[in-house]
Image (spheres, grey):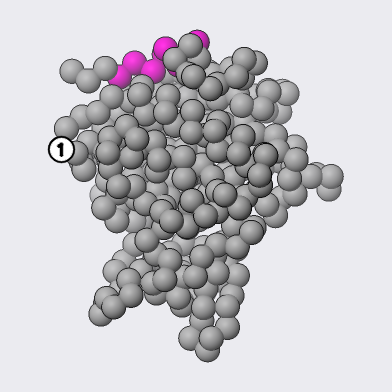
Amino acid sequence: MVPDDLRPLASAAELATWRPGRPIRVLETVDSTNCEARRLAERGAAEGTVVIADAQTGGRGRMGRSWVSPPGVNLYLSLVLRPKLTPRHAPQLTLLASLAVAEALESCFGLDAAVKWPNDVLLGGKKVAGLLGEIAATMAGIEYIVMGIGLNLNMSAAQFPERPLYAATSVAIEKGEPVPRLPVAIRLLELLDDYYRLFLKEGFAPIRSRWERRCPMLGGFVELDGGSGAVSGEALGIDADGALLLRLGDGRVERVLSGDIVAFQAPGDPSPRPR
C-alpha cells in the first residue's frame, strides 16, 4: 500500500526551505482549499500560508468550472502570497506555479511534464494539473493572491468526469502504478518557495525562460477560445506580463490575455489535435 498520509506536512519539519511563520494547514475535507485560503488571507494570514486538503466538496477551476476532488488520491493545495505587484502582473505567478508543478513531477517520478498556457500542466498531452489564481486588490495594488493547485496523482480513469472538457490523466495512470503523495507535496512546496524567492529577487524573466522551455506548443499552430470568439495563429511565446503572443494569419502579433487552447498543431503536423 502506498503511504498517503499528508498530515506530516502540518509540522513543516519535512521541508528544507519552508520558512518559520508560514503555517501549513492540512485538512481532511474542505469546500475548497482556495476558499479556505481566502478566508485566512482576509483574517491577515501571513504570506506563505498553505492549505492542503484530502478532499474538496466544492473544488473549483477557471471560469467557474468544477474540479473533481475525491478523497485520498490527489493533491489539493492553495498558497497565500502577498507580492508587491499590480494586478496586471498577477498571471506571472500562475505561470510560476505551473512551472513548479511540472518540475516536481519530473523530480519525483521522472516524468516529462509540459506546461500549457495559461494554467495547465500536461503528461503525454493530457491534463494532469490545473491552477487557479485569485486576487484581492485595491487601487494601490494587490492585497493578496491565493494560488490553488489541483494535481491528479492516483485518480483512476473511472473517477474522471464522463465527458471531461479536456483529456485528463493522473500520475498513476501514466506510470501504471499508484504513487505516494507526501514526497511530491514536499517537493512542490520547496520548488514554489525557490521560484518565488527567485521571482522576488530577479523578476519574471528567469521564470519566463524556464516556462517557455517546457511549453511544446510554442512554434506551433494553436486555436484559442477567448470567451468572445475563437482566434488562431502561431504561438510565439509569452511576454513580460504573461500574455500569450500569437502571430495571426496576416502577420500581426496579438497579445492574448485570457482564453483556453482548444487545438494544437505542431510544426509539420498535417492536422490539428484537440486539447
- Which residue type carries mark 1? Gly
Which residue is rendered at x = 29% and y = 78% of the image? 268
Residue 250 location (% of width, % of height)? 52, 89
The quarter of the picture where the N terminus appears is top left
Q: Mark 1 highlights which residue? A: 176
Which residue is rendered at x = 49% and y = 76% of the image? 231
Q: Nearer the viewer, residue 163 or 251?
A: 251
Which residue is rendered at x = 62% and y = 31% of the image? 80
Q: Is residue 56 above or below residue 212?
A: above
> Is 64 on the left or on the right of 196, as rendered?
left
Which element carries disc 1, helix, strand or loop?
A: loop
Q: Nearer the viewer, residue 171 or 163?
A: 171
Residue 227 in view of the camera: no
Residue 140 location (% of width, % of height)? 84, 45
Magenta span = 4-11
- Can you tell which quarter of the image residue 146 is in? top right
How packed mark 1 is, by other alpha carbons closer than 10 Å (few <14, some 14-19, many 20 or more), is: few
Q: Is residue 210 above or below residue 228?
A: above
Q: As drawn, which residue projects farthest toward the bottom?
A: 250
The kind of secondary structure the magenta stretch mainly shows is: helix
Q: Nearer the viewer, residue 55 or 185?
A: 185
Q: Nearer the viewer, residue 163 or 104?
A: 104
